[in-house]
Structure formats: structure tokens, C-alpha cells
Amino acid sequence: ERPLRKPAHFRNFVGRRVAVRTNERHRLRGEVVAAGEASVTLRTDGESVDIPYDAIVRSNLIEEAGTR
């Protein structure tokens, strides 16, 4: 599970699944659909969630079978 820290990391993995923990103790898993300068957008359970980078405490790429 590769850690993601910078906007460029998220841009490299648009279309892939990630796990994100925010400073408000929210834990989200979803597909990266966009990675802008200030925030990343995840698709989780059919809805899009915009998360500012400064709110992210930890984030990791979720390795899926056959993606290595």
C-alpha cells in the first residue's frame, strides 16, 4: 500500500482506489476521479467527495489483484 502525500501522487493514480484518513477522523475509500492543486476528488459509493489536501492525515493506494 503505497503512501500518497503530494498532489502529483494523486494525479498519477487517477482511476485507482485509495484509502484516506482526514484530520476530522473520517476514513474514506474510493476511486480518485480528479486531483487539483488544492484538493482530491474521490468517488465513494456512487457519490463524489472533495477532500482538501491540508485535511488529509494519511492516504494510501489500495493494491488490487493484478496491478503490480
Image (cartoon, rainbow, N blue to C red):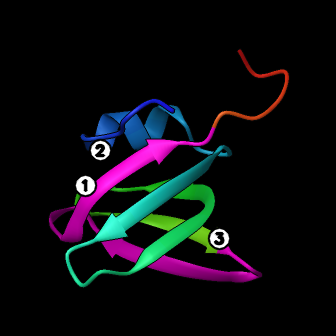
For badge 3, the amino acid type reads Arg
Span colored in magenta: 44-62
Residue behind mark 1: 37
Q: Position of residue 15 (x, y in %)?
A: 68, 46
Residue 51 vs 16, above or below: the answer is below
Q: Position of residue 24 (x, y in %)?
A: 24, 84
For the point 58% across and 44% down, the residue is 14
- Tell me which label, 3 or 2, sits earlier in the chain: 2
Residue 15 versus residue 20: which sits nearer the camera? 20
Residue behind mark 2: 7
Lateral position of residue 26 relative to residue 25, left or right: right
Quarter where residue 51 is shown: bottom left
For badge 1, the amino acid type reads Glu
Report, in whole angstroms, how far the alpha carbon at label 3 lies from the one at label 2. 17 Å
| SS category of the residue bearing label 2 | helix
Residue behind mark 3: 43
